Amino acid sequence: MAIKTIKPAQVNFTPETLKDAAYQGAHSSETLASCARYLREVQPDVLDKGVTDENLSQLKDGWQVRYNELNPADLYIFREGAYIPVEDRKTKLPEGTVTAEFGVNQAMSLTPQEFGKLGGEDSKKHAIIKDWRERFSKYCSRRLGEMIAILTKDKKDAELAALGGKPQLRKTLNFTETLEKVLAELSKQRKNKTKKGDTSAPDEVKWRMAMDAMKKELNRKDEPKAE
């Protein structure tokens, strides 16, 4: 993944007073909100369709820079096919020692195909790279989640404002409407579970027959009782 030069950000900030912490924290949240809204400006349909691969790639480029700042690459000694971590980089290693460095930049420079191939060529190196890739993936998911949460709140606030600031009243469903909603959800679950091999889920024909029979019985008019 190519890393382009970006504007430097304020890092390693340590507040000295609660007032200072409150100010810097508010500033930080406003900066994140601005970045989230810029994503929406670049891709207006982001909430409906999700981030495109191209835009997600650019976001990951930026997150990778920060992740590398927070998590510098590790140094390893390569000896007899094994990678031994060097706990202190200041340690003077014997002359001729073979070393290898692994970090997020090295891990993400591999294409999915190259990463998969590495598993068959060097399983130990693959395991180290895999750990970096998985940790970075979780980091990206959290950062994206924060941005989407801001945009989701913006959308809800806009919808509320369109209603004059009053929340929209939810319609109270009667029993028949509630049943239809429940059956629709069960139909979706049955289909998904069937695809996953759940043999307890009925096939579509049996499910349709069961629903039709239940609806027929519920719609049947009871004959008036004899006096």
Image (cartoon, rainbow, N blue to C red):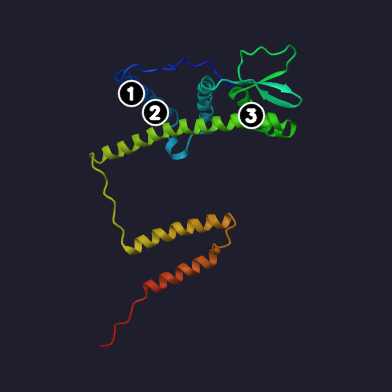
The residues bearing labels 2 and 1 have C-alpha atoms spaced at a distance of 17 Å
Q: Quadrant of the C terminus?
A: bottom left
Q: Would you say the residues marked 3 and 1 are in contact, meaning their CB atoms lie under 8 Å apart?
A: no
Q: Would you say the residues marked 2 and 1 are in contact, meaning their CB atoms lie under 8 Å apart?
A: no
Q: Nearer the viewer, residue 222 or 124?
A: 124
Q: Name the amino acid type tagged 2.
A: Arg
Counting residues from the N terminus, which is met first, the one under dot 2 or under dot 1? 1
- The quadrant in which residue 103 appears is top right
The mark found on residue 157 in the picture is: none
The mark found on residue 26 in the picture is: 1
Q: Name the amino acid type tagged 1.
A: Ala
Q: Which residue is mark 2?
A: 37
Q: Position of residue 197 (x, y in %)?
A: 60, 57
In the image, what residue occupies the spot 42% across and 37% down?
47
Counting residues from the N terminus, which is met first, the one under dot 2 or under dot 3? 2
Q: Position of residue 174 (x, y in %)?
A: 31, 62
In the image, what residue occupies the spot 54% across and 62% down?
201
- The quadrant in which residue 94 appears is top right
Please rate how many residues cluster around mark 2, counting C-alpha atoms within 10 Å: few if below 14, some from 14 to 19, many from 20: some
- The quadrant in which residue 19 appears is top left
Outermost residue on the right side: it is: 80
Q: Which residue is mark 3?
A: 129
Q: Name the amino acid type tagged 3.
A: Ile
Q: Position of residue 107 (x, y in %)?
A: 62, 26
Q: Position of residue 45 (x, y in %)?
A: 43, 36
